[in-house]
Amino acid sequence: SRLPVTPLLVIATCRDDAGNVTALDRFGADVDATIDTRIPLGPLAQDAMELLVTEHLGAIRLPVGNIRELATRAGGNPFTIGEYVRAVLDAGLVTPSWEGWRLDLDGLDRLELSGDAVDLVLQRIDGLGAESRRLLAAGAAGGRWFPTELTAAVCDIDPRRARALLAEAESRRLVTAAGTDGYRFLHDRIREALLVGLDADNLRALHQRIAEVLEAAAPRDSRYVYAIARHYALGETG
């Protein structure tokens, strides 16, 4: 009875792309009367994109025209801009010269880069070995944050080996160490990219495996009760 008069601030965010529009509409229908403020976020303006490209380049100082070219090609999404600049650097298209730094514009035209954030992340993940991708996919199925040892157990990988693989993934800006012996994905788009490569059967089998490992490792740990139930529900039920 006290809930209607209890001060409570809820902030919710959601993308409005085709994959999320159904959930967004459902959320809006459920809480429409209680939503006080809606703030739609459009693409970044050109000057903001150019500033963000400059920040991602760090100490590399490209001519203004090159900065503008990269910003225009990357589009107005902040995460995509970061992925695009990183892909350009990884491809060796920015090199030092006597006059400073230069961008290989011909090479940029030949470089097959999508404007889609998931595709750009997939290109970065492709640089990892199969064992790393399997470990990260298990972590992605577990959630935004995942424990190292339990995820290693899901994949039947030695924990020391798993830590080495995750350190490599951290160097590629896919995950970051967080909490006690765990890692967190730096962006939901990275999780999505890892899960895109799993078909429905493999994803169900992975959830089943996660549930079984969690239940065996921490049968009475209240932190994992809901996680175990969720993974069993998403696994090979019946």
Image (tube, rainbow, N blue to C red):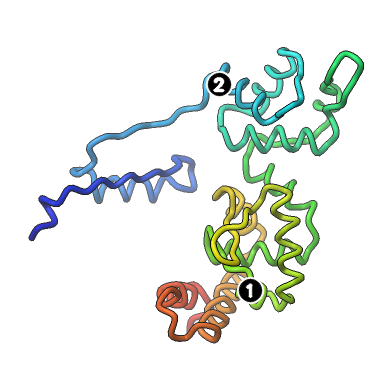
| 218 lies above or below 202 | below
Q: Which mark is residue 48?
A: 2
What is the total number of numbered labels drawn onto the structure image?
2
Q: Position of residue 213 (x, y in %)?
A: 57, 81
Name the residue that disc number 1 marks: 149
- Residue in front for this viewpoint, 78 or 182: 182
- How many other residues sit within 10 Å of disc 1, few (<14), some (14-19) or many (≥20)? some
Q: Which mark is residue 135?
A: none
Residue type at numbered disc 1:
Glu
* Residue 218 horizontal side relative to residue 130, left or right: left
Q: What residue is shown at x 9% (from left), y 58% (from top)?
A: 2
- Tell me whether circle 1 and circle 2 mark residues in contact (CB < 8 Å): no
Query: In terms of secondary structure, where does tag 1 sit?
Result: helix
Q: Tell which residue pokes out farthest to the front in this image.
A: 180
**In the image, which is nearer the foreground, mark 1 or mark 2?**
1
| 3 lies above or below 102 | below
| 231 lies above or below 60 | below
Upstream in sequence: badge 1 or badge 2: 2
